[in-house]
Amino acid sequence: SCDRVGCPTPARHPVSFAWQTQSTTDRAQIERWARHQPQANFITATGMVHDVLDVPLEAGREALERLLAAGIEVGPVAESDDGRLLFFTLTRGTPEDEDEWWPCELDCHPETADEHPGLRWHCRGSYVLVPPARLPGDQAVHWVRGLEHPLPDPLSLLEVLTDVCARHVGEEPDHTDAAWPLRR
């Protein structure tokens, strides 16, 4: 976990507040971080190459079944034991196309996601844990569908995900005091 006393989201956020400027795909740097902090989870910055559509677990499972049954290409999917399913997709906006820039703040911040119990769209300015990741209480984040599946366009999943989430969100308990991510 981080050094913050009473951290409300242990093992779920970057250790450094400068994570956006420190993020890299440089293998040597990633190996150094892994050697220096072998117990740390890794995050992936969203909005540059990929986005993540993050939904409640039961809604996500139902949506995944519907998408696969309809023959819709679904990319990698991760499951968090604390109740979320993460659909990895292509990004909606890229740095070369600044007119289409879609900051995550239009949806939610990862740290305040408890205010958004339905669909969360992690894009520019956000991040998610990379499986395998360990969470407190013997929980984890793991792959349901691996990286061998190509990233789909997020809009191809959106209708099914929003439809299923709209029905499931009404069934969610009150989360006003919940720490992100939500627990069931």
Image (cartoon, grey):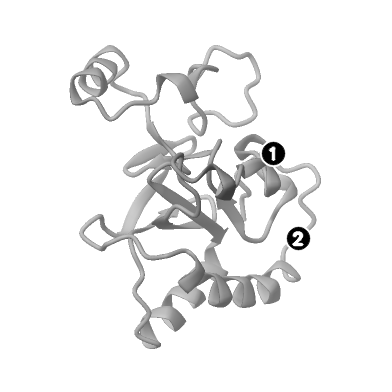
**Residue 124 shows which numbered tag?**
none
Position of residue 95 in the picture relative to residue 176 (left or right): left
Q: Please determine whether, in this image, residue 62 is positioned above or below residue 183.
A: below
Crowding near the residue tagged with mark 2, few <14, some 14–19, many ≥20 C-alpha atoms within 10 Å? few
Q: Amino acid at mark 2?
A: Pro
Q: Earlier in the sequence, mark 1 or mark 2?
A: 1
Instruction: Kindly report which numbered mark, 1 or 2, lies closer to the viewer in this rendering.
Output: 1
Classify mark 1: helix, strand or loop.
helix
Q: Amino acid at mark 1?
A: Thr
Crowding near the residue tagged with mark 1, few <14, some 14–19, many ≥20 C-alpha atoms within 10 Å? few
Name which quarter of the figure residue 173 lies in. Answer: bottom right
The answer to whether mark 1 and mark 2 are in CB contact below 8 A is no
Residue 136 vs residue 125, the one in the foreground = 125
Residue 45 vs residue 94, the one in the foreground = 94
Which residue is painted at 59% across and 31% down in the image? 9
User: How far across and down, in percent of the image, does residue 101 sit?
Assistant: 57, 45
User: How far across and down, in percent of the image, does residue 84 sit?
Assistant: 53, 56
Name which quarter of the figure residue 29 lies in. Answer: top left
User: How far across and down, in percent of the image, does residue 147 sit?
Assistant: 25, 55
User: How far across and down, in percent of the image, does residue 107 sit?
Assistant: 68, 49
Give the total number of marks visible in the rendering: 2
Q: CA distance from mark 1 to mark 2?
A: 17 Å
Residue holding disc 2 = 173
Quadrant into which the C terminus falls? bottom right
Residue holding disc 1 = 112
Residue 111 vs residue 7, the one in the foreground = 111
Which residue is painted at 51% across and 34% down in the image? 12
Which residue is painted at 24% across and 25% down in the image? 26
Classify mark 2: helix, strand or loop.
loop
